[in-house]
Image (cartoon, helix red, strand yellow):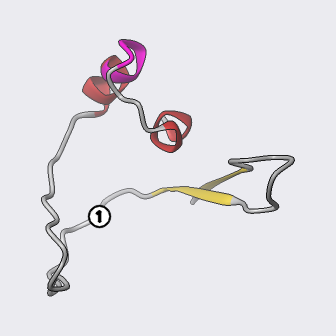
Amino acid sequence: MVRWEALPLPGYTTEFMHIFLARDLQPASAEADEDEQIELEEIPLVELLRQARAGELRDAKTVAAL
């Protein structure tokens, strides 16, 4: 297992982000909450890296994990 810790807002909070590398996962079925609308989408790693380099992937936690 690979685990990485980061401080998202050092100097403001002591919150830690824990990022894990998970492999060989299988989709699980679960009931969504009434107010949830979740859609799964598989994106190849090379495409995520391309999006991050092009500035198209703007979620900082995701970019840091990549």
Q: Nearer the viewer, residue 64 or 38?
A: 38
Label 1 environment density (alpha carbons within 10 Å; few <14, some 14–19, many ≥20): few
Q: Is residue 17 left or right of residue 49?
A: right
44 versus 35 height, above or below: above
Where is residue 21 shown, x and y percent of the image?
A: 49, 53
Task: Identify the residue position indicated by label 1 in the image.
Answer: 25
Give the residue at x 38% y 56%. 23
Where residue 53 appears, as percent x and y from the top left, is 41, 14
65 relative position to 26: left or right: right
**Depth order, front residue of 17/9:** 9
Task: Specify the segment rendered in magenta.
Answer: 51-55
Q: Amino acid at mark 1?
A: Leu
Q: Classify mark 1: helix, strand or loop.
A: loop
| Quadrant in the picture for residue 46 | top left
Residue 8 locus on image (x, y percent):
68, 48
Q: Is residue 44 magenta?
A: no
**Residue at the limit of the structure toward the right, as seen here:** 11
Residue at image position (20%, 85%) is 33
